[in-house]
Image: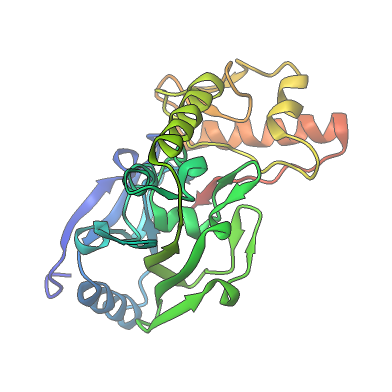
């Protein structure tokens, strides 16, 4: 690692880098600031057959209590920059989605306002096709730049990507840059929508707590939160992890919870929902081992 010009830390607690504040140590935590560094690091990883994982804003992730035996990679530096020119927006994958929504709104550009309350980075949001009711990242992306795990750079248009509900087929690629073509609209109307989305989130989600976002995907024609709530499971806890009393599809790290607590609670809820409704809930959060 010393031969690669990146900022890195050994035995870095992953609890410091996830919104759930859970996870053991990563063997190595690397911040990559340029494409050149990223390609060099991927070459090093391939030559040495090292396991690795790319992290964004840290939401929707659950690392194990044992940590990660390999390299956890985070984009920074040039990947945190963005450009706005007329209707065209180009941003690095590490730009905050909420921040970009505000900046595009200030330029009178519509498209990101309904996604403005989603935590995390633009790259992570595209990779997981993040969204809200009736609006997802796949609706507004024009094209993206990626570097595959072998270090090859490619440009993919939306037609080259298979987007599905809360996922895409971009596995094996690291998103580095995203291109949007947005629509002109009244700046005040866009900012009003952003304000409304934030208020909606504050009123319906456990803001200010340690959580990873929605734990389960919504089954077709139903809501995971409604199913869990119907079983009177709000406030049910395992160890230090509790089902939120605000939204039942959010599990909160309330008292120094651990990954094992979270996994036990996930399995318990899956079993209870299946016993009552014969519905198999799928996790939306990524469980990293």
Residue 72, quarter of picture: bottom left
Where residue 245 appears, x then y in whole percent? 58, 16
Quadrant showing the N terminus: bottom left
Where residue 284 appears, x then y in whole percent? 60, 46
Residue at 70%, 41% (x, y): give it.
218
Residue at 53%, 25% (x, y): give it.
200
Where residue 117 appears, x then y in whole percent? 46, 36
Q: Tell me: 161 left or right of 123.
A: right
Foreground residue among 41 and 199: 199
Residue 270's place in the image compared with 78, above or below, is above
Q: Is residue 38 visible?
A: yes
Residue at 49%, 58% (x, y): give it.
126
Where residue 35 appears, x then y in whole percent? 25, 73
Q: Tell me: 113 left or right of 229.
A: left
Residue at 73%, 26% (x, y): give it.
226
Q: Tell me: 249 left or right of 106.
A: right
Q: Is residue 63 visible?
A: no
């Amino acid at each position: 690692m010393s031969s690669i010009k990146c900022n890195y830390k050994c035995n870095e607690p992953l609890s410091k880098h996830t919104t759930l504040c859970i996870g053991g140590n990563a063997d190595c935590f690397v911040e990559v600031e340029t494409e050149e560094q990223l390609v060099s690091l991927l070459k090093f990883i391939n030559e040495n057959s090292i396991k690795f994982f790319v992290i964004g804003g840290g939401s929707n992730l659950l690392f194990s209590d044992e940590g990660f035996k390999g390299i956890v990679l985070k984009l920074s530096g040039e990947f945190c920059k963005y450009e706005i020119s007329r209707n065209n927006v180009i941003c690095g994958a590490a730009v905050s989605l909420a921040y970009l929504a505000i900046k595009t709104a200030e330029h009178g550009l519509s498209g990101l306002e309904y996604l403005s309350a989603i935590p995390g980075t633009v790259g992570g949001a595209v990779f997981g096709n993040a969204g809200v009711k009736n609006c997802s990242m796949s609706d507004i992306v024009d094209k993206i730049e990626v570097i595959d795990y072998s270090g090859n750079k490619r440009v993919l248009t939306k037609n080259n990507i298979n987007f599905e509900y809360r996922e895409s087929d971009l596995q094996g690629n690291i998103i580095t840059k995203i291109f949007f073509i947005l629509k002109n609209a009244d700046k005040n109307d866009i900012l009003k929508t952003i304000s409304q989305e934030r208020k909606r989130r504050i009123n319906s989600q456990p803001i200010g707590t340690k959580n990873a976002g929605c734990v389960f995907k919504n089954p077709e024609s139903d809501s995971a939160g409604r199913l869990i709530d119907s079983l009177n499971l709000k406030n049910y806890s395992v160890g230090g992890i509790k089902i939120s009393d605000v939204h039942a599809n959010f599990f909160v790290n309330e008292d120094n919870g651990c990954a094992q607590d979270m996994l036990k609670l996930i399995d318990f809820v899956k079993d209870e929902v299946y016993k009552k409704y014969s519905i198999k809930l799928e996790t939306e959060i990524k469980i990293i081992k």
